[in-house]
Amino acid sequence: MIRRDSQGEGYASEASAAIMAECARVHLGRVWATVRPSNVASMRVLSRIDMTLNRTEHDDWGSLHFLSRTFDHDAN
């Protein structure tokens, strides 16, 4: 969570990019995330770090998106 008065400053994007870089560095195969589609800011952050939508499920609170990113360690 980012404090409300600090939201929109790019902290979530910066932290997420650092996490993805570390995942790639340690040769992690895949990262998963879940987010409600109504959480537009989080959807935007996930898009910036190249997460792709795999499926959508529905529960008592509405839609839930499942996204992932696979790392290609054979590149280079």
Image: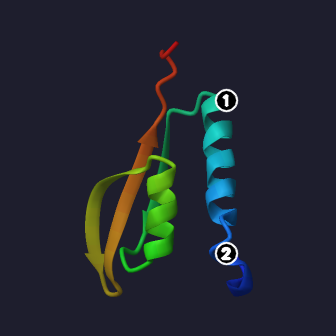
| Image: 59 above or below 16 | below
Spot occupied by residue 65 in the image (x, y as percentages of width and height): 35, 65
Determine which residue is flagged by label 1: 25
**Marks 2 and 1, how far apart at CA:** 25 Å
Q: Is the residue marked by circle 1 packed among few (<14), some (14-19), or many (20+) residues within 10 Å?
A: few
Tell me the kind of residue under disc 2: Met
Q: Which circle's residue, 2 or 1, is located before the other in the chain?
A: 2
Residue lying at the far front in this picture: please name it.
9
Spot occupied by residue 32 in the image (x, y as percentages of width and height): 47, 51
Rendered-image quadrant of the N terminus:
bottom right
Spot occupied by residue 35 in the image (x, y as percentages of width and height): 44, 69
Q: Is the residue marked by circle 2 packed among few (<14), some (14-19), or many (20+) residues within 10 Å?
A: few
| Image: 6 above or below 20 | below
Spot occupied by residue 76 in the image (x, y as percentages of width and height): 52, 12
Determine which residue is flagged by label 2: 1
| Image: 61 above or below 43 | below
